[in-house]
Amino acid sequence: MDSSEVEFLAEKELVTIIPNFSLDKVYLIGGDIGPFNPGLPVQVPLWLAINLKQRQKCRIVPPEWMDVEKLEETRDNERREDTFTPMPNPHYMELTKLLLNHASDNIPKADEIRTLVKDTWDTRIAKLRLSADSFVREQEAHAKLDNLTLMEINTIGTFLTESLNHMYKLRTSLQYSEDGQSQEY
């Protein structure tokens, strides 16, 4: 899975919008949405919120966790802890990117939020790299990585699987040579 596929999955997350149009309930495969009444909040998938915002049909309400104080607390917790802390949303990075790219005018302190989420991401990726380095150096066979998001796993996944493959090949070749088999012909 690549990052665009992870972002596609994130677009199914529900967000609140304030529409400026009227429309009865919309029946979609993924579920019913609406009704839409001007000024009354309604939850819709992110993909629809962005589409309506681009057509100037709504205002997007930022998620509750997308607040400077809450994000500062999340960042500070992540820096303090040795393990990965739970994130406010399993798609925090993708949602932040999409919302700030398409609706930054609806999000108070958008630049600060962007910086805080990037700081949190950088801290978590640095932890992930250290964990992966330790994992490979100590020749572990399995690892427990709680509280990682799909995008974070996607970022390190190829490296980890390739490392495990190389470690397996090295171990099997070492076992083969330790069994007394000569590789000379």
Image (spheres, rainbow, N blue to C red):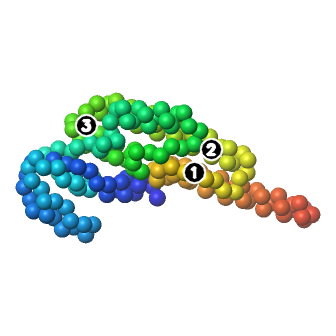
* Residue 68 makes an appearance in the image: yes
Please state, as top left, top right, bottom left or bottom right, where the C terminus lies in the image.
Answer: bottom right
Please determine whether, in this image, residue 99 is positioned above or below residue 166: above
Residue 131: numbered disc: 2
Q: First in sequence: mark 3 or mark 2?
A: 3
SS assignment at label 1: loop
CA separation, marks 3 and 1? 32 Å
Residue 145: numbered disc: 1
Q: Are marks 3 and 1 in contact (CB under 8 Å)?
A: no
* Residue 51 makes an appearance in the image: no
Q: First in sequence: mark 2 or mark 1?
A: 2
CA separation, marks 2 and 1? 9 Å
Task: Identify residue type, mark 3.
Answer: Ile
Q: Are marks 2 and 1 in contact (CB under 8 Å)?
A: yes
SS assignment at label 3: loop
| Residue placed under numbered mark 3 in the picture | 107
